[in-house]
């Protein structure tokens, strides 16, 4: 793949997970292979970048940043492009590469895993996403590769999230070596169609996951939504 569709390149602060507050350079890739009901990223335009034009764009930022974030959409749809681009990026910059992904494309991850430093992986709970098909098998395959790197897991919880999905989540991450970081993220209400989780149920979910897994479980919302930034 010689070019990638990119919606925007910008510097901002990480708003989710353990790196919340870190100043980062974001590359937002266009397109996604999932359609989650709570998705808060409207991608309606893009520009096509070659690896050289994207490198030039990044080097044009004078502001300092801590990590380069690949986000979307779903960046791994452009795995072949990333395999070439990231090699060139690492020649110019020593900043860590932080991948934000829905964790459903294990074969694509395998193409770039050696060039990624940090993986923030979503675990898609069908009762939260509103999608009929589940991704548990894909998530398990993805985790066997992703665990080679610093790994942050995230599951969005809504008012529709079921205990069955929480149990599947526990089973899915039980094979991850060590004590992975797991963020339980209550949905940020963007419209009336998405129901926020009940605080008591949210607490019960987190306590169950702490008991049934070796993960470090944290309940954490979206900081950037509170601050009104990207």
Image: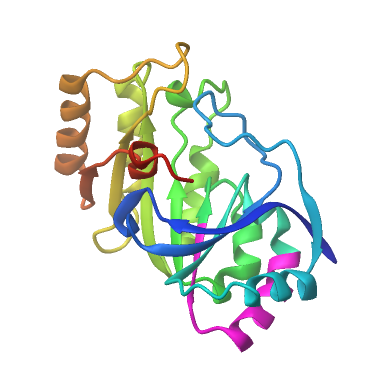
Q: Among all residues in the image, which is located at the extreme bottom?
A: 91
Q: Among all residues in the image, which is located at the extreme right?
A: 2
**Where does the image place residue 101, in percent across and percent down from the top left?**
53, 51
Is 132 left or right of 57, judged from the image as shown? Answer: left
What's the residue at 73%, 36% (across, down)?
44
**Where does the image place residue 49, in percent across and percent down from the top left?**
79, 62
Q: Looking at the picture, does residue 28 appear above or below residue 49?
A: above
What's the residue at 76%, 41% (across, down)?
45
What's the residue at 45%, 51% (across, down)?
121
Residue 172 visible in the current orientation? no
Q: Looking at the picture, does residue 17 appear above or below residue 115?
A: above
Segment tinted magenta in the rendering = 81-99
Residue 208 visible in the current orientation? yes
Is 146 left or right of 51, judged from the image as shown? Answer: left
**Where does the image place residue 20, in percent across and percent down from the top left?**
33, 54
Q: Looking at the picture, does residue 175 appear above or below residue 52?
A: above
């Amino acid at each position: 793949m010689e070019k990638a569709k990119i919606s925007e390149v910008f510097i901002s602060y990480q708003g989710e997970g353990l790196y919340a507050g870190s100043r980062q350079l974001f590359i937002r890739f266009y397109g996604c292979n999932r359609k989650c009901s709570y998705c808060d990223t409207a991608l309606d335009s893009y520009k096509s970048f070659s690896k050289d034009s994207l490198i030039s764009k990044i080097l044009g930022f004078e502001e300092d940043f801590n990590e380069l974030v690949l986000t979307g959409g779903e960046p791994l749809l452009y795995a072949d492009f990333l395999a070439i681009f990231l090699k060139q990026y690492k020649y110019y910059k020593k900043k860590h590469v932080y991948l934000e992904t829905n964790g459903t494309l294990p074969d694509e991850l395998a193409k770039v895993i050696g060039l990624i430093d940090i993986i923030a992986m979503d675990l898609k709970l069908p009762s939260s996403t509103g999608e009929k098909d589940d991704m548990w098998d894909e998530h398990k395959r993805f985790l066997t590769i992703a665990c080679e790197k610093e790994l942050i897991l995230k599951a969005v919880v809504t008012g529709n999230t079921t205990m069955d999905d929480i149990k599947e989540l526990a089973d899915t991450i039980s094979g991850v070596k060590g004590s992975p970081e797991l963020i339980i993220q209550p949905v940020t209400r963007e419209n009336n169609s998405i129901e926020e989780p009940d605080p008591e149920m949210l607490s019960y979910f987190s306590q169950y996951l702490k008991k049934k897994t070796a993960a470090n479980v944290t309940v954490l919302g979206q900081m950037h939504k509170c601050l009104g930034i990207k």
